[in-house]
Image (cartoon, rainbow, N blue to C red):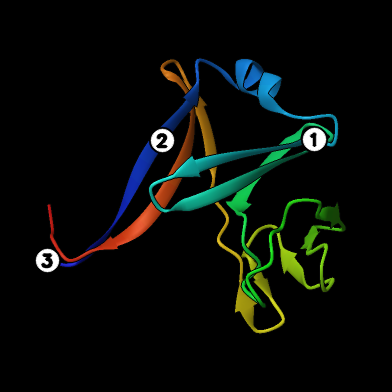
Amino acid sequence: MFSDKTRKYRLADSREAFLNNFNAHGEYIQNFPFGEVLFVKKEDEIYAFINDCPHQGQKMQGCSIENGKVICPVHQYKFDIETGRGHGLFLDFYPLEENENGFFLLRTYFSWFGE
């Protein structure tokens, strides 16, 4: 009856093509129906998370990533890259997937309606 569902949002034909969107600071912002997502490139990894810090709603744009933590540029709150957890709050992270059909952002959400 109730279930979690995952929706895929196509970002580009490939991961390589998607990398062309990033600015000189390794950031890219894209709007989705559920909110603004900040993509951050650090070395060979791309991280995707909501662009609002759960602490006070400040933008995460300009954040840094160190030791597996995303650090809010305003109040220095740190959030774990794997779980989103930090300071008793959670930052929504989104996994990315590449397959033969393109490069996608995956968003899992609760649904009142089953299969």
- Give the residue type that dot 3 points to: Met
Q: Of the numbered discs in the image, which one, if any, rests on residue 26?
A: 1
In the image, what residue occupies the spot 41% across and 53% down?
Answer: 34
Distance from label 2 to label 1 (Cα)?
21 Å
Distance from label 1 to label 3 (Cα)?
42 Å
Distance from label 2 to label 3 (Cα)?
24 Å
Residue matched to label 2 = 9
Q: For this view, does 58 lie left or right of residue 93?
A: right
The answer to the question of whether label 2 and label 1 lie on touching residues, with beta carbons closer than 8 A, is: no
In the image, what residue occupies the spot 62% across and 64% down?
Answer: 83
Secondary element at tag 3: loop
On the image, the x and y values in percent for residue 91 come to 61, 66
In front: label 1 or label 3: 1
Residue matched to label 3 = 1
Pick the residue in front: 31 or 43: 31
- Give the residue type that dot 2 points to: Tyr
Secondary element at tag 2: strand
Q: How many marks?
A: 3
